[in-house]
Every structure is written in C-alpha cells, then in structure tokens.
Image (cartoon, rainbow, N blue to C red):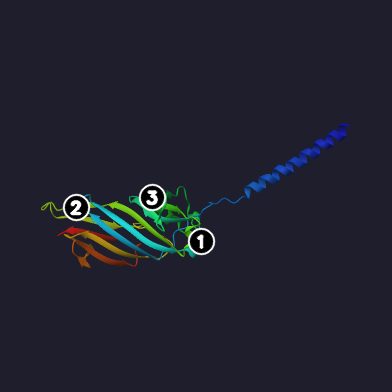
Amino acid sequence: MRIITKLVLLFVIVVGSLFFNGCGKAKDKTPKKRVFPIKLMPVDEHDICIKYQADVDVLNMKDVFTIKTEDVKDWPIVCFIMQRDIVLNTVAVNKQRKDVFIVDRYLNGDFPDYVPVKIVDHIKENANIFQVHLTDDMKEEEELQFIIHYSLYSQPQTDIYNDSKSEFTFNALDYWYPTNISKKEVVKLNWILPQSYNLTWKNEIQTPDKDEFFRVYNLTINEPHINSVFKGMNR
C-alpha cells in the first residue's frame, strides 16, 4: 500500500513539474509590442497659413491637408509630430472636431518604418507625438481632410534707437508643422503680415503677392525639414 502511495505521489510531482515548466516557456514566448504602432500621417502637401498678430506677438497657424482614406483604412489611429513649444488649439477631420492625445513612453521599435535611435531621442527631447483616433464613418469618404490650428509665440526684437521699429524672428525648426519624418513633404506657405511689415526669408526681402490691408506672401518650401529663418520687420 505504501509503495502504491509513493508511486502516485511521484507521478503527481513529475506531471506537475512538466506542466509548470511548459507554462513558463509559453509565457516567455509571448510577443511584447504595442497594440497601436506609431503610424505617421502620409501627407504629400501641406497648405499652411501663418498670420502674425503684432499686438500680442503671436504667430497663429492653420495647416490644411488631405490623406487618401485608402492609405489609412486599417489604421484606428494616426499620428503627427510637432515641436514642444507649439500650442495646439484644435484638430478637425472632415469638419469634425477631434480630441488629441500625446503618445507617451515610446521606443524606436514602435514605428512601423525604421527610425534611427538618434532621431527618436531628438523627438523625445524637442517634440510631442500627437495621436488622433479615426472612426469608421470617416473612412467612408475617399479622402480625409485635416485642419489643424496652432500657435507659436515669437521672440520680438526691438531696435534700441527706434522703439517703433520692431521685428520678429521665426525659426522654422524641426517639427514646426505636423511632421512625418519618414516621408518627403512639400509645404505651401501663406504668410499674412500687418501692412507695415516686410518679410525676410533666406536673408532676402520677399515681394508680397498682395499689399492692401495686409501684406500676403505665398512661398513653397520643398525641403521643410531643413531649418529656415523668417523675419518680419516693421518698415
């Protein structure tokens, strides 16, 4: 009787050890990855309007662009990158105002396309990644139109010899518009300045396309990822 009891006990121990070892191995093989990878919006062209409000010294910007629904039909979330000191006001998709969230605690492996660790570290230090949820009813349209309003407070400079002659400087650093670092983009820029201001770009005074109540400048930037410096000076 004792022998049978010992054999049963030994059988239970052996089976139990195999069971727990098997569970341990299965757990180690479980993949660890994000449910929603950081998929940056595939935009070809941005139409950005920048209006300088001199009384409060702020640049108010509006970016309008479209995305083919076919390109994001399987994406529940789309993302874009913008520098950290930008104030994001509103985001609308097909005229529907959307809530926006900041992506937190991400790694370079969270991007579906390869992004070097150096660039990911630069984004973490200088920018935010914003995410927008896409609903199924939005994907019934052929295109998704995004309208993003945001603001940036410039750094005014005043001539010490003439207080009425002031200027602002806008350093178009990385991520100054909703950026996709994995794709070449074109920015069509529409500057609107007070009638008394000139616009300087690439150290050259630009010729306004309209000069009535406001001065309007239309520019095309084929390499918006490369830093540009814009200056507006009160004439």
Query: Mark 1 falls on what kind of element?
Result: loop
Query: Mark 3 falls on what kind of element?
Result: helix
In depth, the one of 210 and 45 nearer the eye is 210
Q: Which residue is mark 3?
A: 125
Between discs 3 and 1, the one toward the N terminus: 1
Q: Which residue is mark 2?
A: 157
Name which residue type carries label 2: Gln
Q: Which mark is residue 73?
A: 1
To which quarter of the image does residue 64 belong?
bottom left
To which quarter of the image does residue 82 belong?
bottom left
> Residue 176, position in %: x, y?
34, 57
Left or right, 162 with respect to 23, comes to left
Quadrant in which the C terminus appears: bottom left
Q: Are marks 3 and 1 in contact (CB under 8 Å)?
A: no
Residue at image coords 26%, 57%: 51
Between discs 2 and 3, the one toward the N terminus: 3
In depth, the one of 50 and 158 nearer the eye is 50
Name which residue type carries label 3: Glu
In depth, the one of 4 and 40 nearer the eye is 40
Give the mark count. 3
Left or right, 92 with respect to 166, comes to right
Left or right, 218 with respect to 211, comes to right
